[in-house]
Each structure stands twice: as C-alpha cells, then as structure tokens.
Amino acid sequence: MSYAHYGDGLLQSVSVAGSVLTQSNLLTYSYRGDGLLQTQAVNVSGGATYTYAYTAAGRMTAMTISQCRRRELSRTMLTAEFRSIQFRRALTVA
C-alpha cells in the first residue's frame, strides 16, 4: 500500500499492489479551500464517488454517493446512503 499527499500534507491518493488487487490510485481525495474533505473516489470497476457538503462553520450536512455500478459496491453504497439520510435527519432535528 502506498500513499500520495498534496503539498500541504493532505492525503491525495492510496494505491495498492498485491496478489488479490493491484490498483494505482484506488482511493483519491479532493479538499475544499479550508481543508475539509470534498470528494473521495473509489477507483475500481464500477467505483463510486462520495461528495461531502458542510455548513459555513465546517459541520458536515450531507454525503452523496454517485457512479456506483457493481452489485457488491451497490449494497455497501446503499447502506452508506441510508446512514447518510439518518445523519441528515439527525442534523435537521438537532
């Protein structure tokens, strides 16, 4: 497993090389100007992109998932999306 970082030290990507999976830039990350995570991409066949939204104070308000195609990833993403919906409801109630 290897890691790449942006000039400011934030994680840019994760690559893996092994007998089961070898994938350069398996995970990639982008950040907002204030350093908060903006996107996380899972770069495998039928991967997914997680996009995060925040309040002006930096509190996460939403996480959306897109580009999911593989069945096993779909189950994981649906679980994550359900949790995201619960999280947004909790934020709304609080």
Image (cartoon, rainbow, N blue to C red):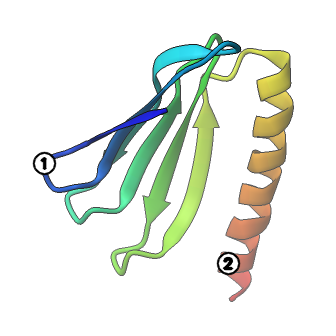
**For residue 22, side relative to residue 54 (left or right):** right
Image side of residue 33 versus residue 44, left or right: left
- Residue 59 vs residue 1, the one in the foreground: 1
In screen coordinates, is 44 left or right of 54? right
Q: Residue, x 38% and y 35% (percent of image)?
A: 13
Amino acid type, label 1: Gly
Q: Position of residue 54 (x, y in %)?
A: 44, 66
Instruction: Give residue 69's quadrant in the image.
Output: top right
Type of the residue with mark 2: Thr
Is residue 88 shown left or right of residue 27? right
* Label 2 SS: helix
Residue ID for mark 2: 92
Position of residue 21 relative to residue 50, above or below, is above
Label 2 Cα crowd, 10 Å radius (few <14 / some 14-19 / many 20+)? few
Which residue was labeled with disc 1? 7
Q: Secondary structure at mark 1?
A: loop
- Nearest the viewer among 20 and 91 is 20
Distance of mark 1 from mark 2, alpha carbons? 36 Å
Residue 52 placement (x, y as % from top left): 49, 53
Q: Residues within 10 Å of mark 1 (few under 14, many from 20)?
A: few
Q: Residue furthest front?
A: 19
Q: Quadrant of residue 73?
A: top right
Picture coordinates of residue 39 (x, y %)? 43, 43
At horizontal 50% and vertical 45% (from top left) the residue drawn is 51
